[in-house]
Image (spheres, grey):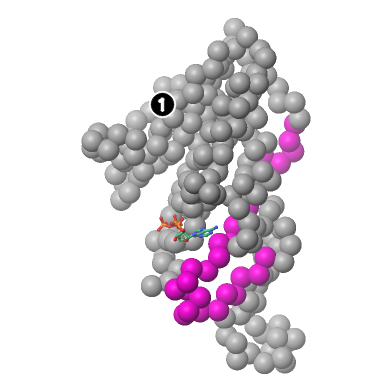
């Protein structure tokens, strides 16, 4: 009978929030000042964009400078692999053992969501790195399980769903997933079937607020 194997190490935290601050583009550098400072691997300071604030205003805490804490913070020199290694790779091991996982990139237009999730040939993104690990772990698995990996890649734009792997398929409808009992929409997911069935879902959620014109 199918059974879920307990993960080798039980994690207390199941949700982590990670920030990745991309470098300014050439255009942005010409027009504005970089006001984001990743000061260590967990803390980010957003400087007050108003340079004219004087010393007194700063010491009296009348600037708009803000400090934010995250589970992990990555600066402009970080690669997608740095993000992957620290915050995603352990989740992938769980997926092979029958656990589900979700990885969402959230941010405004142009903030680097697609770059982080898909990446480039020289800096492969989290989805690509995860797929490599899934196949590496399946190769290393010494149980008698047979694995089947299926993949879907969908986009929801203005409430219409597109299958990005099958461009000629036209619009897709929202539907119930009989296995998971959930609505399938707006997800880029990889399913791993062995004795058990698990799913890792990658999402890119954009907020239409351009960072720069
Ligand atoms: N870490 C990075 N290093 C270098 N360039 C980056 C990095 N992250 C993002 N960029 C660049 O920033 C620009 C915007 O990134 P991207 O297209 O990933 O944003 P997005 O959040 O997916 O935008 P949209 O919501 O409009 O699709 C691109 O030119 C991309 O190459």
Disc 1 secondary structure class? strand
* Residue 122 within the segment the image draws in magenta: no
User: Which residue: 38% across, 72% down?
Assistant: 213
Above or below residue 81? Residue 211 is below
The residue where tag 1 is placed is: 177
Above or below residue 82? Residue 55 is below
Above or below residue 180? Residue 81 is below
**180 or 146, which is in the foreground?**
146
Figure quadrant of residue 23: bottom right
**67 or 152, which is in the foreground?**
152
Figure quadrant of residue 132: top right
Please state the horizontal and vertical placement of residue 157, each as a whole percent of the image. Answer: 33, 49
Magenta residues (range): 10-38
Figure quadrant of residue 161: top left
User: Which residue: 67% across, 65% down?
Assistant: 38
Of the 4 image quadrants, the one containing the N terminus is top right
User: Which residue: 55% across, 13% down?
Assistant: 146
**116 or 198, which is in the foreground?**
116
């Amino acid at each position: 009978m199918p059974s879920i194997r307990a993960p080798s190490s039980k994690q207390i935290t199941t949700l982590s929030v990670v920030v990745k601050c991309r470098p300014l583009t050439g255009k942005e550098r010409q027009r504005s000042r970089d006001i984001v400072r990743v000061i260590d691997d967990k803390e980010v300071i957003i400087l007050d964009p108003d340079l004219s604030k004087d010393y007194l205003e700063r010491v009296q805490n009348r600037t708009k400078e803000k400090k934010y804490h995250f589970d992990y913070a990555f600066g402009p020199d970080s690669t997608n692999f740095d993000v992957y290694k620290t915050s995603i790779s352990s989740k992938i091991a769980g997926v092979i053992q029958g656990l589900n996982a979700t990885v969402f990139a959230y941010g405004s237009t142009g903030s680097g969501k697609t770059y982080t999730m898909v990446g480039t040939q020289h800096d492969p993104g989290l989805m690509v790195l995860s797929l490599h690990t899934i196949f590496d772990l399946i190769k290393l698995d010494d149980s008698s399980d047979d694995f089947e990996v299926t993949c879907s890649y969908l986009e929801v734009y203005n409430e219409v769903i597109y299958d990005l792997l099958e461009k000629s398929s036209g619009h897709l409808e929202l539907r119930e997933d009989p296995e998971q009992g959930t609505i399938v929409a707006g997800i880029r997911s990889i399913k791993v079937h062995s004795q058990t069935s698990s799913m890792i879902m990658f999402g890119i959620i954009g907020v239409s607020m351009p960072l720069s014109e």
